[in-house]
Structure formats: structure tokens, C-alpha cells
Amino acid sequence: MTVYLVGAGPGDPGLLTRRGAALLAAADVVVYDRLVDRALLSLARQGAELVDVGKSPDAGPGRQADINALLVAHGRGGGTVVRLKGGDPFVFGRGGEEAEALATAGVPWEVVPGVTSAVAVPAAAGIPVTHRGLSTSVTVVTGHVGDPASVDWDAFGRAGGTLVVLMGMATRAEIAERLLAAGRPPGTPVVVVEWGTTPEERTVRTSLAELAAADLGSPAVIVIGPVAGLDLGGRAPGPLTGTTVVVTRARHQAADLADALVVAGARVIEVPVIEIAPPAGDGAALAQAAARVAEHQWVAFTSANAVTRFLPLLRDARSLAGIGVAAVGAATAAALAERGVAADLVAEPATAAGLVAAFPPGPGRVLFPRAAEGRDTLPVGLRAKGWQVDEVDAYRTVPAPPPPPEVAAVLAGAHVVTFGSPSAVRAYLDLALPVPPVVACIGPVTAAAARKGGLEVAVEAAVPSAAGLVAALGENRPS
């Protein structure tokens, strides 16, 4: 049993560390804060208990004691507990207090550092907190000024360098007044960044004398000093910057699409609505088919899932010597190539009908490892061309458990939902999840299933692949 104090980063889910993501995927309990992006909760293990301990800015001092006691209780209960905190747990995150409580109770704990907003938010907005000739030091300070002994504003007013203020919007007028009284020039550049690194990011550039008039809310980072006069441009916007996209693929297959969307600037919410399961009978029929592969002139694959289920059952690649290997498209051909098998025939367009059209005429035998619930386009079409088709179930696509309410609630605010298969469309609709304004499908078969389910398909990939779907979204950017 261990409690992990994990930094969630400054806001952008993509800035969570790999260590943090791995712990989320393994956690039995996730205790999360108010400012943690709910999209991160979709990374949690299916069935993990999600506990919201978000505190309002005016929460009383007793609230933290309650959180400490909760962590101790979950820690003593065994299993893996992730305490997910915005930014870095030890930078005004009260992670030190939680660590002390856990240590006092004898509960093992570990801190997993996060990307602190004090540095990351200015950096993403194009403001380095240190810069040759402008600032060689940076001070991070809380904006809580109620206790005169807690912050020496006079010293900060006299000191040079960069001052980064967290949690200071409610007291910005008093902060400016104290710094001005201590000697900071009225024209000192100031940048205020609200909801930094997220699609809701807003930035105001002003001066110390005018800081009180900065009309932004919380959370915000205030940067005071000469570096605030720099504007290096920040992150280059991508074609999907500011767009929230839901990915419905099975979790183990979502990475290529999710990664491509993030590169394009999108905020991604992973909501796997399907899972890939072994075929009925523990795959005995598939193993027998693999043992008799030499009896066939061709093996046809219409998905990467079939490739990953079938090839490991062969002795090695020599089992396919003299046998043609057909793939429905580039993605399936790539899955074959990853396992040392070059496709002899790749359909274009990447559909079962396209593969039928590309196939030579029979006679002969074709082995078709397939999805148990797949369509019959390929076997029917090949038989019409004179082939004997031996079908065998390689896998089943089954509905995944519904996402936790905390994740489902985020979907209502998303801009796009993506579907990579008809089974994903059906599973999503069966779960009665909110449907974002834009429905995007990876190809015509999936789009047809979406329309049959009553959805209006706004985007259809010209090339049925993750890259093709992202390109189509970029060309038809949701407003």
C-alpha cells in the first residue's frame, strides 16, 4: 500500500508526466483536486474509485485536515492510492502537509513531481521567467496577503528579478500597492495568464500600476518584472488548438489517434467504449487454423486486431512461405510489418470491398481470421470470385464498462467525438453518452453505422487511418 502525491501539471493534460500517467492507470483510488482537468480521470484504471476533494478558494482551514484524514484512511486500506494535485504537489499544493500526515500515520508515501504552473504557464505564453540581461532570479510567492508576517512584500518590492504570484487575483490590487510602496516602478511590466496551457487560456499584458484593472479570474499566474515585457510567441497553434476531442477506441488502440490529435493541438478525452476480447472457445479454432495455414494460397486481414491475434500462433514467419498476405489498408499492413511480415496485397480504398476488388480471381483457398461480429463483405465477395474462404474468429469486440460519471460529465463540453469502427458507434449510443456537436468517422463503413444510429456525420476521413482522421478534422475545424 502506497499513497502517491502526483502532480497533474499546469492544466494541459498532455503535461502530466509519464510516471503520473502510469500510476493513474494502476490506481485503486484517485483523490483529485478542483483544478485537475477531468480528462485526466479517463486515464484511471477501469473500476478505480474516484474521490473529488476539490476545495473552493474560500474553504476553511479544517478542509485540509479532512483531506489528510481521508488519505490516511485510504492508504491504510491497502492498494494503490493516487492523490492527484494541480501543478506540483510541493509548490503551494499543500503536499508537504499531506506527506507529514501520512508519515505520522505510518502510511508509505511517495511524491511524483509535476510541472509547476509558476514556470510552465509563463513559458507556454512566451514569457521566460529568467532571461539574460533582464532577470537572473525568480521568486514564486503566494498571493495570500492577509497575514502581514507571511510575505515580506517590502523585500520583494526592493529586490530585482522576476516575481511570480500564484493565487493572487483576489488580492492583486493590494499586491500592486505594496510593491509600488516598496519601490517597484509603476511601469514595471506585468502579464496575467488565466487558465494557462488550456483551451480557455486568456492573457492580459499590463503594468504594475494598472494590475488592479486586469479583468481576469482564477486560476491565474501573475508575472511581474522586466521579462513580462517579452512576447516570444509561446506555443505555435495547431490546426485543432482549442478543440476538445473524444476518442472512443479501445484503450490499447487509442494511442496513435490520441497522440496525433495532441500534436495538432487538441485536448483529448479518452473514453474507450469497446474492448477487444479473445474469441469464443479460448481461441482453439484460431490455433487450429494457424496450424493449417499452409493449406491456403492467401491469408486475408481486415484489421490490425486480427494480425495481433493470429501471427503469434504461427511458429514463425516461415509458416507463411509461399502464401500471399493481403491487408485491408495501410494501418493493417503496418501491423503486419511490425511483426516482420510484408503484405503482398494492400487494398485501396482501405475497405473490405476494396480488398475484394484488388484480389485476383480464384480458384484456391483463403484463410480469413476475422472479428466474430464483423460484416460478411469479404468472404461473400471472394467466393463470388471463385475462392474457397475459410473463416475463423480471431477476436470479439465487446462493449466496455461505462466511464465514471466524472468523465461522462466532461463529454457535454467537448467539440468532437471520433469513431473508428461501427462497434464503437453502437457501444457509445448504447451507453447514452452525450454526443458533442461534431461527429467524425474514420471511414465510410463507420460513417454509415453512425448515420444508421441517428447521428449526423460532419467529418469523414478520406484516408481511413488515425492520420487521415486528424487531417480531415484539421481541414474541417469545428467552430
Image: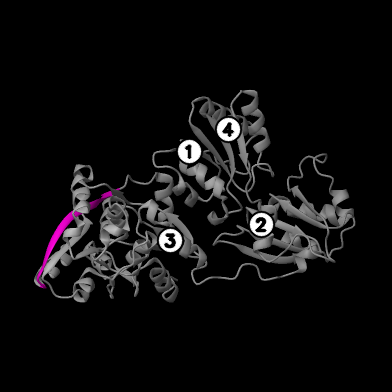
Up the image or down, 81 lies above or below 268; here it is above
- Of circles 4 and 2, the one toward us is 2
Up the image or down, 149 lies above or below 408; here it is above
For the residues labelled 3 and 2, the Cα–Cα distance comes to 26 Å
Up the image or down, 399 lies above or below 107; here it is below
Residue type, label 3: Asp
Question: Which residue is depicted at the point 34% across and 69% down?
Answer: 330
- Of circles 3 and 4, the one toward us is 3
Q: Nearer the viewer, residue 12 or 314?
A: 314
Residue type, label 2: Ala
Tell whether position 395 is magenta.
yes
Q: Which mark is residue 67?
A: 4
Q: Are marks 3 and 4 in contact (CB under 8 Å)?
A: no
Residue picked out by circle 1: 27
x, y percentage for residue 148? 82, 41
Q: Bin the neighbour count of mark 1 within 10 Å (Cα to Cα): few under 14, some 14-19, many 20 and up.
A: many
Secondary structure beneath label 3: helix
**The C terminus appears in which quarter of the rendering?**
bottom left
Q: Which mark is residue 256?
A: 3
Tell whether position 354 is magenta.
no
For the residues labelled 4 and 2, the Cα–Cα distance comes to 27 Å
Residue type, label 1: Ala
For the residues labelled 1 and 2, the Cα–Cα distance comes to 26 Å
